[in-house]
Image: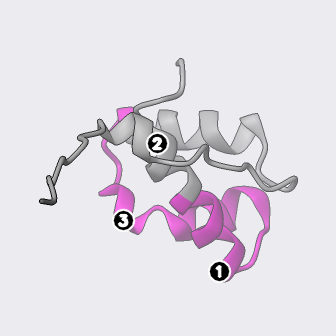
Amino acid sequence: MSTNTKTTTTATEAAPAEVRLPFITDEHLRFLDSLRESGATNMFGAGPYLVEAFGVDRKTSHVILGYWMRTFGRRVR
């Protein structure tokens, strides 16, 4: 006879730790926090702001923004 026991984990237990790539700086994250607070744009449109402010290319801006979005709730501001 087989018993099927299912273990539940919370999202924080199941999610692996987010690795910050070396080119993502605290300055980028603070900039995005400030941009969000300003209401100047929907954060899905924040890539061009990173390009303008930091001179990064479009792809890099999306990597930075993606990291910021994935870790937003876990970071202390």
Q: Residue at the far top: name it.
A: 76
Sequence-first disc among 3 and 2: 2
| Residue of label 1 | 58
Residue placed most toward the observer, 42 or 20: 20
Q: Which color scheme does this rendered protein use? A: one colour
Q: Say which amino acid is labelled 2.
A: Leu
| Residue of label 3 | 44
Image location of residue 25, percent across then percent down: 78, 43
Image location of residue 16, percent across then percent down: 55, 48
Residue 28 on the magenta span: no
Image location of residue 67, percent across then percent down: 57, 54
Distance Cα–Cα, label 3 vs label 2: 12 Å
Query: Which dot, 1 or 2, sits closer to the camera?
Result: 1
Sequence-first disc among 3 and 1: 3
Q: Which range is magenta? A: 37-66
Instruction: Give me the disc on residue 35.
Output: 2
Q: Say which amino acid is labelled 3.
A: Phe
Image location of residue 13, percent across then percent down: 42, 36
Residue ID at (23%, 40%): 8
